[in-house]
Image (cartoon, helix red, strand yellow):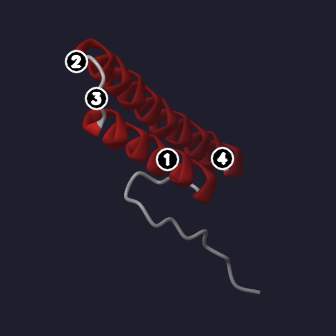
Amino acid sequence: MGMVKKRMSLKLGLNRVQEVLVMGLMIVLVFALWSNIELMYKISIGVIVFTLILLTSMASQVLKQAEERKRL
């Protein structure tokens, strides 16, 4: 019948599992910034969270492009 489109709620083009991962990482970052730990640890956690979110977004886009190429 009709083509079923996958719903993506964030503008990053992530599926639901990746979206939950990103939201969890953001929550970890917020708690790390509010906690009473050294600034170096806060910066390290921020860099790790940013890197993981960036890699998740890039992986999602690569998989999406590979899927589109496979269809052609």
- CA gap, disc 3 and disc 1: 20 Å
* Mark 1 residue type: Gly
Please tell me whether mark 3 sits on a helix, a strand or a loop.
loop
* Mark 4 residue type: Glu
The residue drawn where x is 41% and y is 51% is 12
Q: Which residue is mark 2?
A: 39
| Rendering coords of residue 43 (x, y %) | 27, 20
Q: Residue furthest left?
A: 39
- CA gap, disc 3 and disc 2: 9 Å
Q: Nearer the viewer, mark 3 or mark 1?
A: 3
Q: Which residue is mark 3?
A: 36
- CA gap, disc 2 and disc 1: 21 Å
* Precedes in sequence: disc 3 or disc 1: 1
- CA gap, disc 2 and disc 4: 42 Å
| 34 relative to 50, above or below | below
The residue drawn where x is 69% and y is 52% is 71
* Precedes in sequence: disc 2 or disc 1: 1
- CA gap, disc 4 and disc 3: 45 Å
Q: Nearer the viewer, residue 48 or 36?
A: 36
Please tell me whether mark 1 sits on a helix, a strand or a loop.
helix
Residue 67: which numbered mark, if any?
Answer: 4
* Precedes in sequence: disc 1 or disc 4: 1
* Mark 3 residue type: Asn
Q: Which residue is mark 1?
A: 24
Please tell me whether mark 2 sits on a helix, a strand or a loop.
helix
| 33 relative to 48, above or below | below
The residue drawn where x is 41% and y is 60% is 10
* Mark 2 residue type: Leu
